[in-house]
Amino acid sequence: MSDRVLSPSDLRAALNAIGDERYHIHHPFHRMLHDGRLTRAQVQAWALNRYYYQSRIPAKDATLLARLPTADLRRAWRSRLEDHDGSGPGLGGVARWLKLAEGVGLDPAYVETTEGILPGTRFAVDAYVAFVRDRSVLEAVASSLTEMFSPTIIAERVSGMLANYDFITKDTLAYFTPRMTQAPKDVDFALAYVDEHARTRAQQEQVLAALCFKCDVLWSQLDALHYAYVEPGRVPPGAFVPSA
């Protein structure tokens, strides 16, 4: 590793290169989801398992919020909790994801229990929460930078699902609409934090490694779905078994 400190533009280029190679938009399960090649039951399995990730995001954010050293930083990060948990019952991203799950034919009460999620989903998501809890604040903030790439995957996912599944409506996918403005706001904050606090090449390498880790978390969730519900189709004991 060179000791040369990367300029902000070079660091952005390195971050983007990680996304180009490792972001889960390239995963075969996502390609199948977008292209309409999943059955309704497989889409249900995706919605059910993704709920666990969505529901743990505010818990992840709360652990980091408690570690931020200034009121300004805490105020900025606190908006993420409201984005996901909402300002009241039935509001926020987690509630909207339950509506998505209901829209594809799942019982939201069952989804909320998380009883049917895959072990691979649970291990990956819990590892992400632990990473944000235990690693440096710089690494924890940097791990959120997958949001740099989320507008692209959201636009593709929404257009593909609306075009290819007759049981999907715009209302079903309402979760994604606010994320198109929330994610860029979150990215701007995280990039500014990284620019200010990743002052050495070693710290910049930590930032890049944190983004790689987060990409691995997202990729491994789709690996688990593909193995259980596509090929070879081996659903682990206790996990969701589609009725059709």
Image: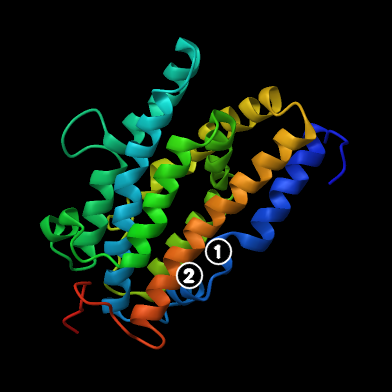
Badge 1 or badge 2: first in the primary sequence: 1
Q: Is residue 182 visible?
A: no
Q: Which residue is drawn at 57% across and 42% down?
A: 145
Query: Which disc is residue 70 wearing?
Result: none
Q: Is residue 185 visible?
A: yes
Residue 97 in the image: state x and y as whole percent: 28, 52
Q: Residue at x 34, y 49 (%)?
A: 54
Residue 57 in the image: state x and y as whole percent: 37, 42
In the displayed structure, does residue 50 sit left or right of residue 194? left
Residue type at mark 2: give it. Answer: His
Q: Which of 70 and 201 is in front in this view?
A: 201
In the displayed structure, does residue 132 sit left or right of residue 122? right
Q: Nearer the viewer, residue 91 or 225?
A: 225
Residue reaching furthest to the front: 134
Placement of the C terminus among the 4 image quadrants: bottom left
Residue 80 in the image: state x and y as whole percent: 40, 31
The secondary structure type at the circle numbered 1 is helix
Q: Which colour scheme is used?
A: rainbow
Marks 1 and 2 close (CB-CB < 8 Å): yes
Q: Which residue is drawn at 29% across and 47% down?
A: 55
Query: Which disc is residue 30 wearing?
Result: 2
Q: Residue at x 37, y 59 (%)?
A: 123
- How many labels, in total? 2
Residue 155 in the image: state x and y as whole percent: 50, 56
Residue denoted by label 1:
25
Residue type at mark 1: give it. Answer: Ile
